[in-house]
Amino acid sequence: MSILEVKNITYVYGEGTPFRIEALKNISVTFEKGELIAVIGHTGSGKSTLLMHLNGLLKPTAGKVLYEGKDIWESKKSVKQARFNVGYCFQYPEHQLFESSVQRDIAFGPRNMGLSEEEINLRVQEATQFAGIDSSLLQKSPFELSGGEKRRVAIAGVMAMKPGVLILDEPTAGLDPKGKNAVIELIKNYNIQTGSTVIFVSHNMDDVASLADRVLILSEGQIVMYDTAKNVFSRGKQLASLALGVPEITQLFLSMGERGFDLPVDIFDIEEAKAALLSLLRRQAHD
Amino acid sequence: MIKDITIGQFFPGKSFIHKLDARIKIVLTGIILVMIFVCGNFYSLGLMSAFILFSFLLTRLSLRLILKSFKPLVLILVITSLLQLYYVDKGEILFSWRKLSITSGGVYMMIFITVRILSLILVSSLLTYTTSPTSLTYAIESLLSPLKVFKVEVHTFAMMMTIALRFIPTLIEEIDRIMNAQKARGADFETGSLVSRIKALFPIFIPLFVSSFKRAFELADAMSCRCYTGGKGRTRMKQQKTGVRDLCAAAAVIVLSAAVIWLNAFFGRVV
């Protein structure tokens, strides 16, 4: 079942100035309930612009955004509701922290929703659990935490609103490997346990391969591909022509294929790679 | 919303006005600003605004920019012109209602003041629209250099201005980003009582201050890493030269000023 639907949206920045840019060109796309979707494309391809339309931060110059079949721009109230239905976690979200304690910062979103104090506390508890934040940190100032912790607190602040769709813009950018893995784990867990749709932007193809059910590729404000991760990564050459990479394992299989080994090209997972290599070795032993 | 502010913005171009030496441009803008106040009747003011409009056309910037630069000042304009209409009590009475009366002198005054304010705004935005912030501060440094005699740190002052100007767009972008992030968490900046609106600013300004301080320290480090020690012995990559073009512009402004003074004397001052 589709949860979010984008219908023929076009968005223009700086209309009427010498800096006019058409950031999105007549885009239509549907996001299914419970899926984990990766959005890729290089800088300026319109990723952030598209995502900012999904919770009504930007109003399309033309076209419609539907949440559960309803136009989010129907009324003032529906736009505000869209902000809570579709949680948006910006790039470097730790820059949005401002409260005197971690607990209060996470509670900011739920408080804006007008929930009861009890419900707010419950949500903060839940969100900190999802984000793997130690309860001893709750009373600390968010500015005292490490980079990875700050990031998780900021993500928890969005999760606490329990959005039906969670958007994360480059959630792992600028983190060390440990912080990165923690964030990837929490995205996966959140998606599985709550059944919410998760949309994330990433430049790391290995992250995309390990997380995403579906991959959306944007280039120059248009959708180039929107397919399962397997189908997308099997088109390695086309990805290269868009100046996008493929996961390291896929790269390895592609290069081996070029050197004459008879291997499948749509592999991006260690287990599958192992199976494919073993079967190749067995075939060669037979010959 | 916040991106609509065009005052102080620079629009690159290759026109005659763009190419003028920034120092000359500043001085001439100053003269024109003074001359706008010297204008005493509709003839001289008309000539003045025609000249300014002509200069704007020379820049080949979109005419919509003029309207945009007026936008933030519409309220001030409306209030001043209404006050003029009410206070000036000269000429024949056109309309009266109880104690209020509108005279022909009042209407003239209203039009005069409006045109004057619009000219002032237009000519000063013309300077910033067509001059890059860097050449603007270099020009200010160069114009202020006589103050070195009094041990004023002109270079430091100019550097501070350059940095401040350079970071305006960055700060605007940052505010935009933080506002979006907080809006995404349901923050509301547009409705509610005055107190709640002021409270709503905290989630923007605290992160903004934190990142500004961080950025300032980083910038200072980066500058020391590149051996910045102040103005002593510093030379410039792009030297500004005064040429024929600048002489022409200066001559035009001098002729204009003379014409304004003559028109004032010939037709008499209304104001």
Image: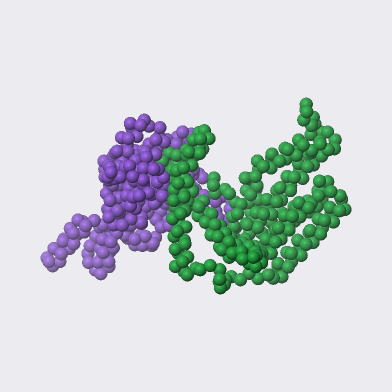
Chain colours: A purple, B green
Quarter of the image with the C terminus of chain A in it: bottom left
Q: Height in image: B248 above or below B48?
A: below
Quarter of the image with the N terminus of chain A in it: top left
Residue pictured at 69% horizontal, 70% vertical: B243
Res. A200 visible in picture? no
Residue A161 position within the rendered picture, expressed as x and y whole percent measured from the top left = 36, 38
Q: Quadrant of residue A260?
A: bottom left
Task: Give the camera-side residue of A147 and B1.
Answer: A147
- In this image, A120 relative to B177: left or right? left
Residue B63 position within the rendered picture, expressed as x and y whole percent measured from the top left = 65, 52
Q: Height in image: B104 above or below A52?
A: above
Residue pictured at 72% horizontal, 37% vertical: B82
- In this image, B173 relative to B255: left or right? left
Residue pictured at 85% horizontal, 35% vertical: B92
- In this image, B185 relative to B194: left or right? left
- In this image, B155 relative to A38: left or right? right
Res. A136 visible in picture? yes
Task: Give the camera-side residue of A30 and B137.
Answer: B137
Residue pictured at 32% horizontal, 35% vertical: A121
Residue A39 position within the rendered picture, expressed as x and y whole percent measured from the top left = 37, 51
